[in-house]
Image: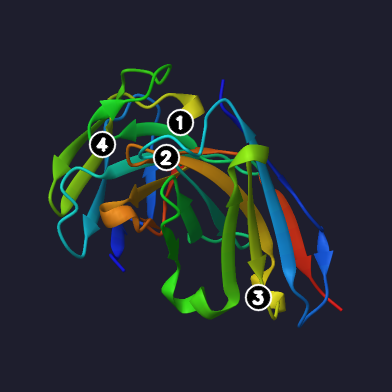
Amino acid sequence: DIQMTQSPSTLSASVGDRVTITCRASQSISAWLAWYQQKPGKAPKLLIYQASSLQSGVPSRFSGSGSGTEFTLTISSLQPDDFATYYCQQSGSYSITFGQGTRLEIK
Amino acid sequence: QITLKESGPTLVKPTQTLTLTCTFSGFSLSTNGVGVGWIRQPPGKALEGLAFIYWDDDKRYRPSLKSRLTITKDTSKNQVVLTMTNMDPVDTGTYYCAQYSYGYLLWGQGTLVTVSS
């Protein structure tokens, strides 16, 4: 199985900050990478798919980039609603695995 | 509108078999490229993909759990069933079903399964 490594595990930031989360795949997955936001007690919410495509209804402050083995999720200006846990997910060859998550907390 | 809903027991005893059903609407599991799968999340921990089944009946399992998992589909009923044998307290968590399409997942609300005697 393809392993996904997210960094950092925890990120402390303030409202208005620009933050970046990185996800690395153990082998090339082309652009088969999605990002999710999860809040406590809720199902994950799709933010980005195919590495850089913004899901309908997701604010434009979220953006994704990368291909091959290295990917990033950027939030351009943090809003209070953005403090949550973020996961990357790959689907190379229909085998689906997740990163270990990045908890974004208020500084 | 795509919706998925998980159903099954909330409490199972150790060594028992868990059977979960995902009932979905708004899409067909006969459509090329579409799949449905199961993901779990132990309390306070990360997401773990368990099993996926695709439009062409291809099945993929988490390698470490492959011997305990079976996933099947009933296209006419819009249902996918996951069975997991020999349940253990470490299998406690929220179990989600999700639609797979073009590399990403759309999720059900999840169901909490507790394994305890």
Q: Is residue A107 visible?
A: no
- Asked if residue B73 lies left or right of residue B106, the reply is right
Q: Is residue A74 visible?
A: yes
**Quadrant in the rendering for residue B1:** top right
Name the residue that disc number 1 marks. A82
Report, in whole angstroms, how far the alpha carbon at label 4 lies from the one at label 3.
33 Å
Image coordinates of residue B64 in percent, x first then y, are 46, 78
Report, in whole angstroms, how far the alpha carbon at label 3 lies from the one at label 2.
30 Å
> B21 above or below B13?
above
Front-most of residues B70 and B109:
B70
1 or 2: mark nearer the eye: 2
4 or 3: mark nearer the eye: 4
Tell me which numbered mark, 4 or 1, is placed earlier along the sequence. Answer: 4
Res. B90 mark: 3
Question: What is the chain letter for disc 2?
Answer: B
Q: Amino acid at mark 3?
A: Val
**Quadrant in the rendering for residue A28:** bottom left
- At x 67%, y 76%, the residue is B85
Label 2, secondary structure: give it: loop
> B15 above or below B104?
below
Res. B34 mark: 2
4 or 1: mark nearer the eye: 4
- At x 70%, y 51%, the residue is B21
Label 4, secondary structure: give it: loop
Name the residue that disc number 4 marks. A50
- At x 59%, y 77%, the residue is B68
3 or 2: mark nearer the eye: 2
Front-most of residues B66 and A11:
B66
Question: What is the chain letter for disc 1?
Answer: A
Res. B17 mark: none
